[in-house]
Amino acid sequence: MTDIATHLKINDTFNKELPADPILENTRRQVEKAAFSYATPKKTAQPKLVSVSKETAELIGLSMEDTQTDSFLQVFTGNKVLEGTKPYAMCYGGHQFGHWAGQLGDGRAINLAEVNHKGKNWALQLKGAGPTPYSRNADGLAVLRSSIREFLCSEAMYHLGVPTTRALSLALTGDEVMRDVLYNGNSAYEKGAVVCRVAPSFIRFGNFEIFASRRDNETIKQLADYTIKHHYPHLGEPSKETYIAFLKEVSERTLKMIVHWQRVGFVHGVMNTDNLSILGLTIDYGPYGWLEGYDHGWTPNTTDNQQKRYRYENQPDIGLWNLLKLANALYPLIEEAAPLEAILHEYKAAYAPAYQEMMKAKLGLDKDYAEDAALIQQLEEALHLTETDMTIFFRNLANFKKETNIDSAVDKNFLNPVLAAFYKPEELTGNILVHWKGWFKNYAARLKAASLDDAARKAEMNAVNPKYVLRNYMAQVAIDAADTGDYSVINDFLELLRQPYAEQPAMEKWFAKRPEWARHKVGCSMLSCSS
Ligand code: AMP
Ligand code: MG
């Protein structure tokens, strides 16, 4: 019988080089002066593998054949601990919705091990594998619904070219888990599941903040030195300058990640500092969502309904807010505010040009032309006038011909290439039509001034404007099918989202506006943190 351990090259560093919690009992408590606590995954009743990402398996050196073994199933549902490994839960804190929340930690994530493949180290982490010292008053488990969402979206984001943690496998545990989906007193049993996540590291901003909050400068230094040694080795030996350079690069990576989110219309939903990766990876797929109607004020997270702190347009500012908290946590290592403030100012200054560059790419405009800000703003205004599907609009805009004569176009014919993006085309009259006409005239004029012909521009636009994203209702379609025992939709979507920029004629039905039934349905446009 295959032992999956023989196919994995274990190379633990985090739990070997950083201070461990000396208490071994799995009891819920405050953990001081330790980067992690040992924790063993809970055994599951009847594990069943639902889906595997081939690309992520390859990252860690496993073939698809390896993933179909019983040994794989037992290890990646937590039933068997890999020989020579000591699974653990990380200690971190965080600012949640703008407020310091104290110790949080891996309450329902257990790191199995790090493995090395082709010279790279990958941490393997089970999400939903039972309680740890950080579980507070919750159960450490995850339900199938949220696990499908995490599994599919991690891989979809990777294929979209967005920095992200990865997902190796999705498995049912066979256990039942009690959840109150909308926090309204209606609890019910749901199927339990476990996702194995993979990333170079799962360290978050909050890992640094927890020690800063306790004035534990020694552990902050240990953690910073570890992070730089393994994940930012090009920055050199630890020193004040290195810590400054470290914050600078984290800031640049965070900005880059958020610009990608804006490009594809991804709204994270819970950008608390414990959900921001120190590597600039999208992490913790909870109540995230995708812009359907292009609406800068939208957030999928019902828990954030009042303030909408984590709405689409606020993501860049929240990135900065979170970096300020990280800078505060690193301050004891630097003891000088000016270089830290300079980094935060640079983030602020860099965002607008980065956003402009990204939007120009979406519009097929060349980079070195300074006059496009007004055109972009005019478009954003137009997109808000009547509900317009972001993905369809940008994808189909590539079919616009620059020689189109907008003035002599009959009625609204000039909108034909993008007509499918409008939820209520009948609203395209009066001022709304005038606005669109104005924008398309400016756009056509701009395209004529550029050197690209229509075909070349289309190819460039199609490489940045995805055809397929994990629309909110699609995740729910996969979940509803899985609830009836049909897991094929998960695998269909995994396949579809492998090539989000390609035309896939057989899958065209997923290049469509959200159906009306999904507009206010729980799970489609309304999601809570209950998972
Ligand atoms: P999240 O909102 O998923 O980022 O989680 C915030 C904090 O709550 C983290 O410390 C999680 O580990 C913890 N948490 C969330 N759900 C659970 C759960 N079911 N059991 C234990 N801890 C949880
Ligand atoms: Mg989290």
Image (tube, helix red, strand yellow):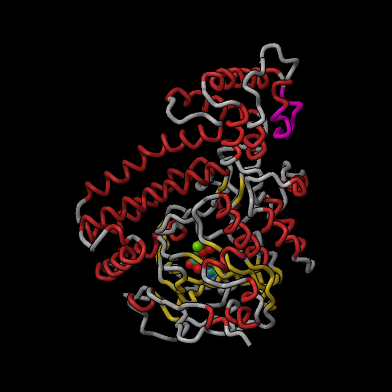
Q: Which residue corresponds to the image point at 45% horizontal and 78% vertical from the top-left? A: 10
Whether residue 384 is visible, yes or no, is no
Dividing the image into 4 quarters, which one contains the C terminus? Answer: bottom right
Above or below residue 522? Residue 123 is: below
Q: Is residue 152 left or right of residue 521?
A: left
Q: Position of residue 119 (x, y in %)?
A: 42, 68
When the figure is inspected, residue 431 is found, relative to residue 482, above or below; the finding is: above
Can residue 161 be found in the magenta stretch? no
Could you tell me which residue is drawn at 57 percent across and 70 percent down? Answer: 196
345 left or right, relative to 24: left
| Quadrant of the rendered image containing residue 263 | top right
* Location of residue 358 in the rendering, given as x and y in whole percent from the top left corner: 49, 37
Seen at 46% across and 33% down, the residue is 356
| Residue plotted at (65% across, 80% down) | 69
Q: Quadrant of the N terminus?
A: bottom right
The quarter of the displayed image where residue 31 is located: bottom left
Residue 213 higher or lower than 111, as above or below: above
Residue 187 in view: yes
Residue 91 in picture, x, y percent from top left? 41, 71
Q: Position of residue 230 (x, y in %)?
A: 35, 66
Which contiguous range is marked in magenta?
Answer: 417-428
Residue 243 versus residue 65 in the image, above or below: above
Residue 436 image-quadrant placement:
top right
Dominant SS of magenta comes to helix
Q: Name, please, the residue furthest toward the top.
A: 408
Q: How many marks?
A: 0
Q: Nearer the viewer, residue 408 or 471?
A: 408
